[in-house]
Image (cartoon, rainbow, N blue to C red):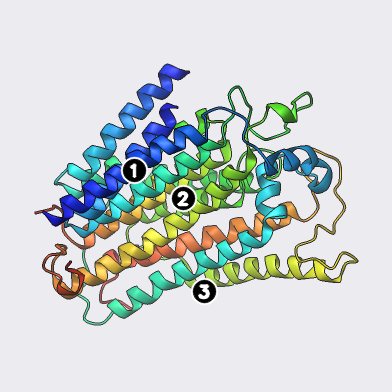
Amino acid sequence: MIRKIVYAIFAAIIVIALVMFFAAYPFGANKMAVGTYYLNHGVAQTGAANIVTSVVLDYRGFDTLGEVSVLFAAAAGVAILFFMLGIGKKERENLTKPNFVVRVGSRIIFPFILLFGTYIFVHGHLTPGGGFQGGSIIASGFLLLYLSYPGTRVNRGGLSIIEGLAGLTFVVLGLWGLFTPTDSFLYNFLPKGLFNTLVSAGILPIIYIAIGFKVASEFAGIVDDMMCEVICRGGEK
Amino acid sequence: MILVSWILIVLMIGLAVLSIELKNLIAAVVAMGAVSLIISLLFLLLQAPDVAMAEASIGAALTMAIYIIGVRETERSEK
Amino acid sequence: MIYYVGSFLLIAIGLYAVIVKKNLIKILIGLNLIASGVNLLIISVGYIKGGTAPIFSRAGLNAKMMVDPIPQALTLTAIVIDASELALAVAFVVLLYRHYKTLDIKKIRSLKW
């Protein structure tokens, strides 16, 4: 009963917030303050056609570094929790084998998923998409592989190396900016190139490719930990 | 355009209510994934293609898979 | 307009699940719904009527007719964080289930309120 009362109080707060929100921020009106500056100067300052990319990686690049570290911490937390669970596991379960169409179809479609994910994060500064989207598409390709071939294990050492190298690329490119005349972290020191071509926008595509590899390997690691709980009980990790 | 967004939002609210009221937890998780998919369509209507791609690939695919593995490791239905 | 109402309803439904429900998986589903509602609210604040996506993919696009890029950048990072945090939460739920053999928070003594 007390839960219902607490919820009623929260619902009242939500209704009041809705009314206040309608009054303060009309839908569809132009409310930009900082966004106008980014839209007007983003192309000249960063060289990326996608302004969202230039906000994520250039103007707010430091926040993205923090976000990638939060992602790393969460993936490490999942791995540690399931390592703690490893004591007293049940015996190995025998999963039913998926049928022929699923197995052959996933084998055919898996390289194309990898190719599509790579395309998404290589073209992150020109078209919608980027490292986060492409990385998660690649990780869902690995998920497909796990579902169609139970008992698959990815090479965890290789995933760790890719993840570490990608993170190192991001930090080294950021630190390099400290040695340029501007003395600022994550300064875009490479030449901007021709606008709206693949090799343009300085360091932004390199950082997005690094983020793509990092996100892909971290989500693949999370999926691997979770699937290992289902499949390889009693076995070694 | 406006009609499409009305239909999508009504569908989204219905699926959200379904996802917390269904007793079968697998069905509830699948309804939650459908909410994420509809939200990614709404992001596309709101001119945010980057966010729509992220929501479709992370919110609808990976999160749902992780939840389903979690449900499989615990209980299938809510008592 | 309808987007505001939809996102607030989504937040309300998620809060209902978090406060009233007693099953741990249902509570996590409620948290996910709250996160989705907040993302939808932030994106719809940045929308401008008749605007285009903030991408200069061809010549002739006017910067005055573009939607706000900052809410999109914020939401992009928020979605990835949500997914990883909820994976951690699912791992905690599996750990709790192994220890207490139940998902009901009434029976898990340290979570009772």
Q: Residue furthest left?
A: B79
Residue tagged by mark 2? A141
Residue closer to the observer: B65 or C71: C71
Quarter that holds the C terminus of chain C: bottom left
Q: Quadrant of residue A153?
A: bottom left
Comparing A68 with A23, the one in front is A23
Name the one closer to the observer, C89 or C67. Answer: C67
Q: Are marks 1 and 2 in contact (CB under 8 Å)?
A: no
- Which residue occupies the foreground of this view, B62 or C10? C10
Q: Is residue A178 above or below residue A132?
A: below
Q: Going by the picture, which residue comes out furthest to the right?
A: A181
- The mark that comes first in sequence, 3 or 2, is 2
Above/below status of A20 relative to C49? below
- Dividing the picture into quarters, in which one does residue A164 lie? bottom right
Residue A236: % across, % down: 34, 78
Classify 10 Å Cα crowding around label 3: few (below 14), some (14-19), many (20 and above). Answer: few
Quote the CA–CA distance across marks 3 and 1. 48 Å
Residue A152 showing in the rendered view: no
State the residue position of label 3: A157
Whole-angstrom CA distance, mark 1 to mark 2, is: 39 Å
Does label 3 or label 1 sit earlier along the sequence?
A: 1
* Left or right relative to C65: residue A227: left
Side (left or right) of A31 relative to B23: right
Number of the label disc, if any, that sits on residue A14: 1
Q: Image check: A135 left or right of A186?
A: left
Q: Is residue B43 left or right of residue A194?
A: left
Please state the chain letter of the residue tagged with numbered disc 2 in the rendered image.
Answer: A
Look at the numbered disc 2 and give the secondary structure of its residue: helix
Nearer-N-terminus badge (1/2) = 1
C-alpha gap between disc 3 and disc 2: 19 Å
